[in-house]
Image (cartoon, coloured by chain):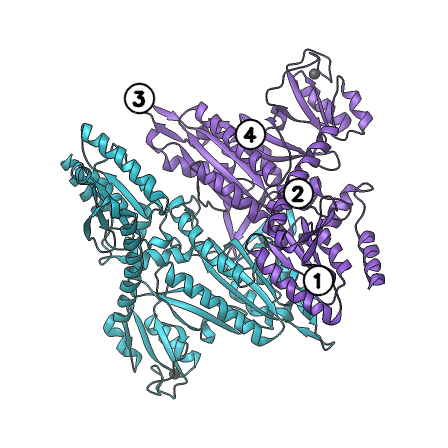
Chain colours: A purple, B cyan
Amino acid sequence: MQPRRFAWVEKVLKEITPKSSDFSQWYVDVIRKADMVDYAPMKGFMVMKPYSYRIWEFIQEQMDRRFKATGHQNAYFPLLIPEHLLAQEEEHIEGFSAEVAWVTMGGNEQLAERLAIRPTSETIIGAMYAQWIHSYRDLPVLINQWANVLRWEKATRPFLRTTEFLWQEGHTVHRTADEALAETLQQLEIYREVIEEYLAVPVIAGVKSAGERFAGAVDTYTLEALMGDGRALQSATSHFLGQHFSKAFQIQYLDEDGELKYGWTSSWGSSTRLIGAVIMVHGDDKGLRLPPKIAPIQVVIVPIGKGAEREAVVAHAKALEAQLANAFRVKLDDRDEFTPGYKFNDWEMRGVPLRVELGPKDLAKQQVVLARRDTGEKLSVSESQLVETVQHLLDAIQSELFRQALEFRESHTMSVESYQEMAQNGYRGFFRGDWCGSETCADHLKAETGMTIRCLPFNEEPVTGHCIVCGQTSRYRALFARAY
Amino acid sequence: MQPRRFAWVEKVLKEITPKSSDFSQWYVDVIRKADMVDYAPMKGFMVMKPYSYRIWEFIQEQMDRRFKATGHQNAYFPLLIPEHLLAQEEEHIEGFSAEVAWVTMGGNEQLAERLAIRPTSETIIGAMYAQWIHSYRDLPVLINQWANVLRWEKATRPFLRTTEFLWQEGHTVHRTADEALAETLQQLEIYREVIEEYLAVPVIAGVKSAGERFAGAVDTYTLEALMGDGRALQSATSHFLGQHFSKAFQIQYLDEDGELKYGWTSSWGSSTRLIGAVIMVHGDDKGLRLPPKIAPIQVVIVPIGKGAEREAVVAHAKALEAQLANAFRVKLDDRDEFTPGYKFNDWEMRGVPLRVELGPKDLAKQQVVLARRDTGEKLSVSESQLVETVQHLLDAIQSELFRQALEFRESHTMSVESYQEMAQNGYRGFFRGDWCGSETCADHLKAETGMTIRCLPFNEEPVTGHCIVCGQTSRYRALFARAY
Ligand SMILES: [Zn+2]
Ligand SMILES: [Zn+2]
């Protein structure tokens, strides 16, 4: 069977562009070969196949549990938003107007007013909250929505930039600015926890500069991650909206002191783009590497052997599968049309964290061979130790992926005193530098280098005292990168 | 505080129209007062507030678990469908064309081809399946999608008929007709199990007559439930699509014998309309009555007492809440701005199955009073027996609601030998009668009485041998009703 195996290896490797030679093409190759997405017949749209949707379900489960534990409830608001509502908050419509898909006909009739497919739901939700909130006793309102949204995009990149995507959007109203801000930061921390502990993607938390804020926000807080090509990905955002939307939509409450006051609102969102982060942070030339906590299949069992021997091996593999299934997401690959080598490559491509190999010799010795996807290490384990070893290795792989990602990020982060220094790394990686706070400098930097201010990381102060662009007095320490 | 309590009671009762006097108005009153939905600013659209969305989450959880256990995986397909794709299956587009909302502009540009917001996804999914399926080894394909869909409706009725609604739609492809049919019926049985065991709504399973079939189906299987006003609600459907869609979309596979063959497909769906069924089957003049298994709050604790006494009662109520929270969805209503009487009415309106009343006297005796929402019965229970009694009562309420609904249905079902007999019940309820199989008779009946054939129930044979409309030889035993 060896020839067939090698032929396949060659074929697979030919089909995946090496990560180092063309990261962009590698990304597209991997998500297609790992069966995560397909392109829909309409430009800009993709289909999330079961293998990627399952990852989304794990992310949803973790996020949703934490939202509920912090007092939030889910609800569902309409997909369509009348044009006049979308336009009610000035900065908001300016930010989104170019990206909106419009419904102009319903049931064979031309509509009197165009309806926008929601690009985000602050406006329709704000209009409803204005109806629901009367008294301070009605506050806080803590609601989240799992939904699809549309933003008409020129360029498409599965998970990262598609016309339609899935997300959750939380929308809250509070009695005071302090409470709204505390909510905004609490939700950012929930995102950090899920992204770092489940997706094994290290993030840097901070606040956006004015030029990078959500349209209509007072402040946008963000988690920035570094991808394998040295570009940044904004992984989740949480917005302190002040009273912008409550004033635009008349979200008012009668306070305990008898005065009518505007509420303070927040919104926060995370999306299927997180799956893109997992791929770009952990993937390698063999394909995906999935963190065990969100892997649809954590352990794959590949039986090895021919003829009568094979039958005994497969029968025993089924028993192992049943045993492991009590504690893990396990799959037995007993397809007889493929060689073990083909299967090894196939499941490595799909990023399954751990492979169990079982052949006639192993059977005789009552052992199996375990192969780690993250390091490639192999070890023989006696069957009596299997369950605990698998648990131990899955934990180790989860930690190792995070460690590798953190190491990569740290080795691709440099401090600069002037923006010209960024060129030496080909503008790849995170750059830390001082910034004067002027949008002119930010715009100049972007035009000249493509670098943007990803955030002003929490708890950091100016270092040199001089803006890396203009040299003037620096007010902030900023994190710069080229971004998705 | 008594006067305030009575004033409120009167106010509540005035605001809910009695079920018997105007069922339709009662329905709308209840869902508004129980805080389940609100109307959106656009005609035809509603907002699902947290209290109803939570019920949807419980339904989702039960359905999804069963879908996965039977080998299905979730995926996500685009919201928008190009017009040419939607039109590719002839009967399908005929059935849906009048209900479609069209996107004609994206990002300030007029689109070359209109995009339909999915009214259902057979077409876009069919187009994708044609790409994915090549060999018999790729079959079966067993995929489900949780999604929003739009059908432009003239009349609106929350949960039952709204322009947008949430649902799940399963879409499968099989090698043989038998397998596809088995899948269709298996999914119908999953629906029956969840609807009867969780929603406590009894259903009658059967096949639709040709005139009532899903557009494009060979056969549509259905579960029909009887609402409190004697009208039927189609609660879930499962369609055997034969090769209609596989031929329209070229879903073909190379079989083991080397021949290229068309796949056999099924689709099946259930939606938020099920929440409407729960309301209409179980509700009464006091409001909702929720089956414990899907009640967002299963037990509400209302402390009773004033001044210093009240403090001790509330403190103890908190301890009870913590104890019950280990096993049940429990809420302590310790709002101090409302009287206990107000709260009793409020939670009865919201259909909470069980109320725990705790006053100073109960405290002294180490007991509580339990009040059942379904029967109104009250009983004193010692605290040491509380958890097991609550469990026992919730089980009893779940059964009792189903029993009452079944009894109502049986007492509102009559057999008729001619359709004129239906008039004596004011066309309320289910009618069983023979049918010749001619659509002319079905159309005549509908035009004259508003009654439609809900289904041809499984395992039933003609009884009189004569069609209730034309008197000709009957081929079927049918279930008739006016329907939502
Ligand atoms: Zn500057
Ligand atoms: Zn007839």
Report how far apart the C-alphas of labels 1 and 4 lie in the structure.
Answer: 71 Å
Report how far apart the C-alphas of labels 2 and 1 lie in the structure.
Answer: 29 Å
Q: Which residue is mark 2?
A: A397
Q: Residues within 10 Å of mark 1 (few under 14, many from 20)?
A: few
Q: Does the Cβ of the disc 2 residue fall within 8 Å of ligand 1?
A: no
Q: Secondary structure at mark 4?
A: helix
Q: Is A340 placed above or below B318 here? A: below
Ligand 2's quadrant is: bottom left
Report how far apart the C-alphas of labels 3 and 4 lie in the structure.
Answer: 32 Å
Residue with the most extreme front position: A365
Look at 52% across and 66% down and name the residue there.
B95
Q: Earlier in the sequence, mark 2 or mark 1?
A: 1
Q: Which residue is mark 1?
A: A364
Question: In the image, residue B100 lies at what x, y percent?
Answer: 53, 57
Report how far apart the C-alphas of labels 2 and 4 lie in the structure.
Answer: 45 Å
Q: Secondary structure at mark 1?
A: helix
Look at 50% across and 59% down and name the residue there.
B99
- Which residue is more in the foreground, B67 or B319? B319
Q: Earlier in the sequence, mark 2 or mark 4?
A: 4
The type of residue carrying mark 1 is Ala
Would residue A49 be seen by someone viewing this image from the given angle?
A: no
Q: Which residue is mark 3?
A: A257
Q: Nearer the viewer, mark 1 or mark 4?
A: 1
Q: Is A256 placed above or below B257 here? A: above
Q: Is A334 placed above or below A120 here? A: below
Q: Are marks 2 and 1 on the same chain?
A: yes
Q: Which residue is mark 4?
A: A91
Q: Are marks 3 and 1 on the same chain?
A: yes
Q: Does the Cβ of the disc 1 residue fall within 8 Å of ligand 1?
A: no
Tell me if A390 is positioned left or right of B192 in this view. right
